[in-house]
Amino acid sequence: MRISGSGHISSEEIRVSGSGHLPGGIRVGRVRSSGSVTIGGDIEAEEMHFSGSASIMGNVRAASLTASGSFSADGGATGGSMRFSGSSKIGDGVQLEDSLIAYGSLTVRGDVEAQNLVELDGSFDIDGKLATRTFKAELSRSRSHIKNGIQADHVDVRKGRGTDAVLFGLPIFGRGSREGYLVTTDIVAREEVYLENVRCDSVTGGDVTIGEGCEVRGRVRYSGTVEVNPTAKVQGHPEKVASREG
């Protein structure tokens, strides 16, 4: 182990303030780092908190993980709940018993599964499917991507705030108003679907709203109610189907 700054290492807790390099294969109660830390392999802890830069050259498992700044893991991420703000990259899939919340930029090279909630605010690139109970997203001014579709009970995707950039207290019109959009394949929800600025192959849900900026290349299927914004592009007429029970 190498620590430049201050630190504490025990079987219960690892603390790093400054910069540190830790070996892989760590199992500990808590990990807290402020500054820059590199972990040379897998790590497992009940609680992890990273502030600054964290690089894990393996898999990460935590009952609770929060990271602000720059976070990367070469392997997958498993555990209870995880919360990221800034730039985050996961080299394999994410599988959580509770929730995933990310603000800023998120890249996942695999599936994302969280039993209760996935909430994304910014831009995201998921190289697999996304499955959860409730999926919420607010899109930044760029393209986001979920390769293999979305499965959830509730889906709510909205365009970003679209505020204009400001220079010397004056708005620069047109600079900050460009809206982002989400590209995916099939969206399947057991209950509500609300979409803005989404381009997808098909939508299936209970109460379905296809909002402005959307493009659905295939069918829209609904079992409750349906509303399609006049500016949205939908292939054919929405199709009423039997309720998805069970």
Image (cartoon, rainbow, N blue to C red):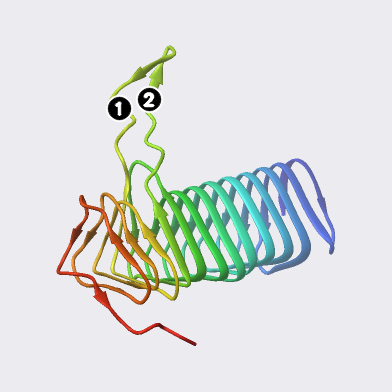
Q: Nearer the viewer, residue 137 or 95?
A: 137
- Whether residue 208 is visible to the viewer of this picture, yes or no, is yes
**Real-space Cα separation, disc 2 to disc 1, in angstroms:** 6 Å
Q: Is residue 229 left or right of residue 17?
A: left
Q: Nearer the viewer, residue 117 or 52?
A: 117
Image quadrant of residue 83? Answer: bottom right
Q: Residue at image x 27%, y 27%?
A: 174
The three-letter code of the residue at mark 1 reads: Arg
Residue farthest to the top?
168
> Earlier along the polypeptide chain: callout 2 or callout 1?
2
Residue farthest to the left?
236
Q: Which mark is residue 175?
A: 1
Position in image of residue 192 (x %, y %): 43, 67
SS class of the residue under badge 2? strand
Q: Residues within 10 Å of mark 2 (few under 14, many from 20)?
A: some
The three-letter code of the residue at mark 2 reads: Ala
Q: Which mark is residue 165?
A: 2
Q: Residue at image x 66%, y 49%?
A: 50
Q: Nearer the viewer, residue 154 or 81?
A: 154
- Whether residue 58 is visible to the viewer of this picture, yes or no, is no
The answer to whether the residue labelled 2 contacts the one labelled 1, judged by CB atoms less than 8 Å apart, is: yes
Q: Which mark is residue 17?
A: none
Q: Residues within 10 Å of mark 1 (few under 14, many from 20)?
A: few
- Above or below: residue 193 compared with residue 4: below
SS class of the residue under badge 1? loop
Position in image of residue 25 (x %, y %): 67, 69
Q: Residue at image x 81%, y 58%?
A: 13
